[in-house]
């Protein structure tokens, strides 16, 4: 709450890499880790274009039980290889309390996905760690519910919470979700926590990602998390919303220019 923390908090995710305050953090990478070649190639490309951290899911919350569920622990190993190859810290989603200890040891930022935003057991357990947690807004969560979920982690003693607006459910079906950019302003007024935006899951469409990213920066977001794939057409998950490394490079140029103006 701003009343008790008037200054913006800065969360350090790896030595020299942080989010909040004056810095803008850009996290990029595929929806899911698919192979060593794929994750290391994307990691090298996004790093060359200025991303400061790598994303990639190993445990995937899929709507259909028959869809690709992620590579699991094998995927986490490949993320570690990509980190060694590029130096990029890794952000990846945790779904089960069973895996917390392993994640704490092997990943840099633990993502809590929209579907688990109110998994209170998970939140309480993460409050007992000091890991940076990227807490995504629930599918239909109000801002207050989202902040209360953050509070579970903070109240447990972990100050390293990063919020992520990723679009909410509305009546609109043209886009996968509706990006609620006013939530960025609302949260930043009430809370000291850094707020990132995920334009990929918000829009669900690759061609919208750049403009939505620029809008997020203009709205005051502290960072972006963007799905980038070296072969979106053949991606095992979320290919239609994934941009290519070449598109990511253009996006980074423009993001840099908008960030200078705000
Ligand atoms: C993801 O980042 O791959 C993801 C599943 O996101 P969300 O939880 O926002 O749907
Ligand atoms: Mn995805």
Image: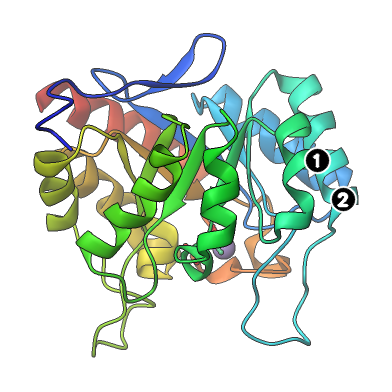
Tell me the quadrant of the picture where the N terminus can be found: top left
As rendered, which of 188 and 262 lies closer to the eye? 188
Tell me the quadrant of the picture where the C terminus can be found: top left
Q: Is residue 262 visible?
A: yes
Q: Nearer the viewer, mark 2 or mark 1?
A: 1
- In the rendered image, which residue does mark 2 sit on? 73
Q: Quadrant of residue 64?
A: bottom right
Total numbered labels placed on residues in the image: 2
Residue at the spot 49% in from the left edge and 24% down from the top edge: 50
Residue at the spot 60% in from the left edge and 47% down from the top edge: 125
Q: Is 117 located above or below residue 16 in the figure? A: below
C-alpha span from label 2 to label 1: 9 Å
Give the image location of residue 233, x and y in percent. 66, 68
Left or right of residue 106, residue 90 in this image: left
Give the image location of residue 114, x and y in percent. 46, 65
Left or right of residue 210, residue 238 in this image: right
Left or right of residue 204, residue 130 in this image: right
Q: Is 159 located above or below residue 7 in the figure? A: below
Give the image location of residue 249, x and y in percent. 46, 35
Residue at the spot 70% in from the left edge and 56% down from the top edge: 97
Q: Is mark 1 within 8 Å of ligand 1?
A: no
- In the rendered image, which residue does mark 1 sit on? 102
Q: Are the residues tagged 2 and 1 within 8 Å (C-beta)? A: yes
Q: Is 204 located above or below residue 135 in the figure? A: below
- Mark 1 closeness class: few <14, some 14–19, many ≥20 residues within 10 Å: few
Q: Quadrant of residue 255?
A: top left
Give the image location of residue 213, x and y in percent. 30, 47
Callout 2: SS: helix
Residue at the spot 77% in from the left edge and 40% down from the top edge: 101
Callout 1: SS: helix
């Amino acid at each position: 709450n701003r009343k008790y923390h008037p200054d913006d908090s800065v969360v350090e995710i790896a030595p020299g890499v942080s989010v909040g305050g004056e810095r803008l953090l850009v996290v990029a990478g595929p929806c899911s880790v698919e192979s060593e070649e794929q994750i290391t190639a994307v990691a090298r490309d996004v790093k060359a274009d200025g991303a400061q951290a790598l994303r990639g899911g190993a445990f995937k919350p899929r709507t259909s039980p028959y869809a690709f569920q992620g590579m699991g622990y094998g995927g986490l190993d490949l993320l570690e290889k990509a980190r060694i190859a590029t130096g990029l810290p890794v952000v990846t989603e945790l779904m089960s309390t069973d895996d917390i200890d392993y994640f704490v040891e092997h990943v840099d930022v633990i993502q809590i996905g929209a579907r688990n935003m109110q998994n209170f057991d998970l939140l309480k357990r993460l409050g007992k760690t000091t890991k940076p947690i990227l807490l995504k807004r629930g599918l239909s969560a109000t801002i207050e519910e989202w902040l209360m979920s953050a509070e579970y982690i903070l109240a447990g003693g972990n100050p390293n919470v990063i919020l992520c607006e990723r679009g909410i459910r509305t009546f609109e079906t043209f886009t996968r979700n509706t990006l609620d950019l006013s939530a960025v302003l609302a949260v930043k007024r009430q809370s000291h926590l850094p707020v990132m935006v995920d334009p990929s899951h918000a829009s669900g469409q690759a061609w919208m990602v750049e403009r939505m990213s620029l809008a997020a920066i203009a709205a005051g977001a502290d960072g972006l998390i963007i799905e980038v794939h070296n072969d979106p057409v053949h991606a095992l998950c979320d290919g239609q919303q994934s941009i290519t490394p070449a598109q990511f490079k253009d996006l980074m140029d423009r993001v840099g220019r908008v960030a200078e103006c705000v």
